[in-house]
Amino acid sequence: MAAPSHTSVKPRDSVAPLADRWPLLGQRRALVGYICGVVALDFAAILFFAVSGNFRWSDLLTFTALMACGAVCIEATRRLGMPAGVSRDLLSAWWLPAALLLPPVYALLAPIPLQFLLQKRVRETVVYRRVFSSAAIGLAGCAASLLFHGTAGGLAALTRGAGEPILIAVGCAVLFTVVNTALIAIAAHTADPDSRWREVLWNRESLLLDVVELCLGVLVSITCGLNLALLVLALPPVVLLQRSLLHAQLQAAARTDFKTGLLNAAAWQREADTEIVRARRTGETLALLIVDIDHFKRVNDTYGHLIGDQVLVGVASTIRSQLRDYDVVGRFGGEEFVVLLPRADVTEARRVAERLRSRVGRMAVPADDNMITVTISAGVAIMSVHGDDLIELLAAADLALYRAKELGRDRICLPATVVPPARRPGAESAPS
């Protein structure tokens, strides 16, 4: 028999309101230390190169022109907005030329005005994320700048059109991407140590976008090096590409829950219906799970909604990491999640549900000087056993979930009887 459900509880004290005002303080100590270290290194590098470098008005003019182009890109896409979470843009088309054409101090400074514009003109987010992004991009640009100027010799070598300097520029662009991605991936993994490295590094889509950014950055660098006025010709295609990229990301964001990154209820229902139709046609088995975080209201009441959101994100990430690529997982509403397991019978479904219960039970989220642990309960329904369509399967799994709660929570249950129609996806669950 499973152990009783429990949640680590500690009354809120003066630290919690401080964490509400300064969200960075609510993160893991290792993450706070890492972010502060990267930002401090970036600030020290800016001071060092600003003091040791030689100032030239032509460099300042080139830097201003590149930043103006970046600002135009931001303003041109402002009405589209930017999806929450990790989003991609093509601003490297302006950061990378600053690294290749100008002294390192400009590469360190370039992200600051553009990140400020993103914060004020596109979408506000917690300030420490903008500051960290600026530092990570700046350090990556500084590394690329030092390598390029140390090997190729700078602007003159790039604009002669010789193959070797261009290859070096491509290599420096790759270095820029690798360093930037590594710095951000370390932060993401520190925030969620249970995540797999391949989830926070590259996938096929992000690698393709990195290649596009790399090519754009090198082309804009060569164009700018030939004649600064040619930026007028380079700007429109970059703006168009960035608008297309953001539009695609916003379409994807419309299908996902903004807090957890999982499918939202409507998108999950569409994909689940498709899988059920396929299972009927092929005669394969299929299972449905409804997963609920036990006593989640107690977490919000004790620690605040900011920490509660971190628990939601942690549970969602843990669930996603334990499933197959073709399993369909979404946020059902409140603290409930839904999982569709194609080609899973009752034995496989119970095994997966038990694995989720065990992994979530070992998860810990830092809050104040304590670590929050939560448990989950789950209801399991099997197609052709407990129902033949999505509504019947949801009804059966929902009844099984309430049975698990009545038996003490932190357990997996199957329905015992035929049940009436369930709540449709998107309905808020009752408080635990």
Image (tube, rainbow, N blue to C red):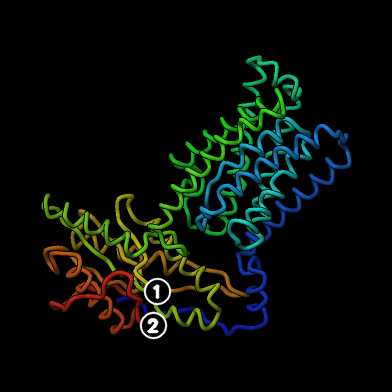
Q: Nearer the viewer, residue 57 or 8?
A: 57
Q: Is residue 242 above or below residue 211?
A: below
Label 2 crowd bin: few (<14), some (14–19), many (20+), radius 10 Å: few
Q: Is residue 13 left or right of residue 417?
A: right
Q: Secondary structure at mark 1?
A: loop
Instruction: Give the mark nearer the N terminus: 1 vs 2.
Output: 1
Name the residue carrying label 2. Answer: 431
Q: Secondary structure at mark 2?
A: loop
**Type of residue at label 2?**
Pro
**Residue 218, horizontal then vertical, whole percent:** 62, 29
**Residue 165, horizontal then vertical, whole percent:** 67, 20
Count of numbered circles in the view: 2
| Residue visible at 76% across and 22% down in the picture | 153
Name the residue carrying label 1. Answer: 334
Q: Marks 1 and 2, how far apart in space?
A: 8 Å
Q: Nearer the viewer, residue 60 or 334?
A: 60
**Type of residue at label 1?**
Gly
| Residue visible at 19% across and 63% down in the picture | 346
| Residue visible at 18% across and 76% down in the picture | 421
**Residue 180, horizontal then vertical, whole percent:** 62, 43
Label 1 crowd bin: few (<14), some (14–19), many (20+), radius 10 Å: some
Instruction: Say if mark 1 contacts mark 2, CB within 8 Å.
Output: yes
**Residue 62, horizontal then vertical, whole percent:** 76, 34
